[in-house]
Image: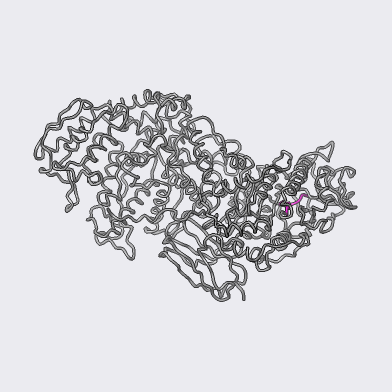
Amino acid sequence: MNQTILSRPLIRPSLDPYQGPWSDLQIRHLLSRTLFGVRKADLVALRNLSMEEAVDILLTPAPTPPLPVNDYNRDDLVDPFVKWGETWINEPQPEDGELISARIVSLKAWWIEQIINQGLSIHEKLILFWHNHLTTLSWEVYYPKLSFPHFQLLREHAFGNFKTMMRAVTIDPQMLLFLNGAFNNKEAPDENFARELQELFCIGKGPNAGYTEDDVKAVARVLTGWSFDWEQGERTWFDWAHDEEDKVFSSFYGNRVIKGKSGEAGQQELDELMDMIFENNETANFLCRKIYRFFVYSEIDADTELNVIQPLAEIFRNHNYEIKPVLKALFSSEHFYDDSNIGALIKSPVDFLIGYWRSNNVQFPAGATVSNRREIRTSMLWNMSGQGQQLMDPPNVAGWPAYHQTPIYDKSWISTDSVPNRAITTDSFVYWGFWSQNLLTNVDLFAFIRVLDDPSDLNNMIDEVLLLTIPMKTSDVDKQRLKNILLTGQSNENYWKDAWLEFEADPENQMKRNVVESRIKPFFQYIFQLSEYHLH
Amino acid sequence: MPVMKRRDFLKYNSLTIPSIASGIGVHTLSKSPFLQALYNEYVDTDKILVIINLSGGNDGLGTVIPLDIYGKLADARPEVIIDKNKLLKLEDDIAFHPSMTELRNLYTEGKMSIVQGVGYPNQDYSHFRSTDIWMTGSDADEIIYTGWLGRYLNLEYPNFPVDYPNDLMPDPLGIQVGYNLSVAFQGPASSMGMVVADPTWFYDLINDEIQPAPNTQAGKKLEYIRLITKQSQVYGEVITKAAAKVASQNSYPDTNLANQLKIVSRLIAGGLKTRLYMVSLDGFDTHDNQVITTDHSQGEHANLLTELSGAVAAFLKDLDSQGTADRVLTMTMSEFGRRIISNASNGTDHGASAPMMFFGNNIEPGIFGSNPNIPDNPTWEDNLPMQFDFRSIYHTVLQDWFCLSQTNLGAIFTQNFQTLPIVKNSPCISTATKEVNRKAGRSLIEVSPNPFTTYSKAEFVSDGEAIIVQLFNSSGQMIQTIAQGKFPEGKHSVTFETELLPAGNYFIRYQTQYFQQGKWLVKVR
């Protein structure tokens, strides 16, 4: 702890509203932390707004997305329950494992599609936050019919009330199967969910987290009776399985007793359990730390705990666990925009790949069919998976180590495997495009440059590209090298201007195009391999 | 538990393009004694080419001065002409710029030669285009997407980059120092070279240091990323080891070019099997202040030639003391010369042909070609006519220095060019070693018959991923897609028609999401 205090001398930990300049640096910071990647269009949209207006827009829920459909049939695999192009979410779970797998992958690809198409709303990133926090592993549950409503639940409550969401997730079938709630009964209580509810979802392992092993047992007993009907494929309640004895909790929970109830009344014990957990101050503290680590910075020193986390938790409690006021206070705070928090997080694979995709405005190849589109999203899924982050399947119930594993946190995204993988990915983008099954998706670097204010002005062009790709000021050495690349070692900046203007005046001319293209390729390759490009 | 299908990750530890700051990727080399022996034998006889790119367009008329037309020259370029008495005389009718003392000494010792009037037909006066023409070896009106060095390396190491580095070729195929990136090393499927950012990058690597970052939260993350990136340098270890083998080096001037060449010499002496090095000296675009008004023997051009002269002399001396001099041929290149007439700002504008310089123990010393002539009353439109096509030089180097056969040269250039007697006869790498090189790495695609006439057959391996196999002509245009889609794991073959293709060179490219491999093909009548 002492070491981290020393490492953050410049920070002003305070939730006071940010009063400083509202310039591109702050706007891109807000965009990068709440969306995936920074797009010129988004930056421009927020330039004309105040900070408060910008935060309000980003905290607006996104429209409900279309349902996932059968886009996975192929010659040797046909879903007997669902026609091509129709949704499978209400259809029975198939027996064929290949089909189950196809639906899971299709669902993941569907989410990637939603993330890419996000508007000016934090919604998709919040879902990822909640997914990492209230973790389930879709391959392990292996029941896509349950995975979809689970993620809908996260989507629905993402901006809503944490207590309501926690209650819903506790008896959500995907969670009942994932953490064995479905097998928890009075004869053989299963403590799996009861433990994680406290350790990972609500109370945590902070210095003031004092729940006991007996509390774990008691929570498990409260939750007996909730189960899963395999025939109907839905949640159910078994009177016979519910423990009707009283459940007595430790002093950490004020020695509370949840009276045992029988029959359907036993279900009310869940509400009492939620009341008990959410009356405990640690729940808000724990959640606010989690939010902070995900959106602001990986480490929390004593100062930040006192002046940011505690006031944030106070807001959370005062608003009866409504999520939005907490986010609003955080994203409007002096602390969030502190220089030392800018660029201080390492991009997750989703930030890295989808961020690239969005800021380059990568489009499907012309004539891409529904299958092709699913294949492209699937290839993206595997690419991120290769970098250490497979959506809907974190490594375990604790989520990705980047958000909880002390002391490494987000450094866990960077390894001697992931660095080359990331470099290969961006190199491929620059030189060939992105490969999937049968298709090469072209990554049009010209499209990136054309939206800039004045691509013919060398310095302007470099500054603007760097603004959209790098969170902090780029060193003069790197800028000089970038100039060198565009100028082929010459110092006269007009050589670039001439080349660009000649190309623009005659874009079909292959020779003129090649002159520009053979310089912007290594230019972008250089930027994407800067260590700074891994930060956001 | 369900069985999960996640055939997703990088299955091979290979890289598509060795990335800018290096090839990255991790590889542990397992060395068999047999291969080690082969490797050692090979190093002793291998040859190396070092190219010094004088970027910006070097003023040939101000570098190698034709004394027979000195009067006309003085009239044509009064703003830059150097006092005849200050020039360094080589022969009766030819002299060096006064800053080239060390180079004149090398010339006198028989370690330097000059080829006059090198250029190409229909000179392009854009730095960008002309540099690309020189780096790719194209005609003025032709676009080629690969570099001449890349195509040469691809011929020698056709499996690159799949399963590289390996026992047979543990080292980078080519190294370019500096960020003035060129397409010279671009091969048909991937870049064949590695780029060393600058001398600092090199010393950070061998001294196990990383570029410092500011003492901030972001700075700490940066340092971590840089550390891991350094550990991922696929060639980091071989370079560090090679550098460590060299106990001491001769002294070099402390200039940018000298620092680059110092590294090159160290890597050569350290035993890297790397054959091609490219370094560069920028700033030759002397539209103004090429000379200073009061003394034309001084100015920007003089400074650049001083740097060149000092660096090359130190380099050659160091090679001598390391015992590697016989294996190294060094040459300069520049995208064009400069205009005959000077301009009012004490400089010269973009021109056409210019002399190239060659250094080493194995060059035939002397001057090839004749002094340029200029019109009696030159205008700004007049340029020096070309005597030799720059691709003649490339042919010469590949054939006489690297011992490439005519057939192989045909795969690198679309046309034939005369060779010049600038390289001394010297032993060549044995054919057996060449065969070994060809086998280094893993072959993903083979084509037979090759050469072919009416048809040929591509045999390739699949690991179950999507594959695309395409045929390109020698300038890089796609001719046809031969195979595309997901193929089950194992070997596959596709026969393709070639009846309608014009005779000439082609290459076939195999591509998956993670790697590329290209092989040269020849269609014959």
Residue B335 shown in magenta: yes
Question: Is A503 on the left-hand or right-hand side of A286?
Answer: right
**How far across and down, in percent of the image, does residue A465 sit?**
53, 41
Q: Quadrant of residue B40?
A: bottom right
* Quadrant where the N terminus of chain A is found in the figure: top left
Work out whether residue A457 can be spotted.
Answer: no
Q: Is residue A396 above or below residue A369?
A: above
Residue A455 shown in magenta: no
Q: Is residue A147 above or below residue A474?
A: below
Question: Is B71 on the left-hand or right-hand side of B127?
Answer: right
- Between B299 and B234, the residue placed more toward the observer is B234
- Between B233 and A238, the residue placed more toward the observer is B233
- Between B79 and B186, the residue placed more toward the observer is B186
Work out whether residue A319 can be spotted.
Answer: yes
**How far across and down, in percent of the image, does residue B475 sit?**
61, 62
Which residue is drawn at the image coordinates 42% and 45% (left, top)? A349
Question: Is B21 on the left-hand or right-hand side of B362?
Answer: left
- Between B353 and A363, the residue placed more toward the observer is B353
**How far across and down, in percent of the image, does residue A47 sit?**
46, 34
Please name the predominant secondary structure of the magenta segment in the image.
Answer: strand
Magenta residues, start to end = B329-340
Which residue, as the protein is rendered here, is positioned at the far left?
A262
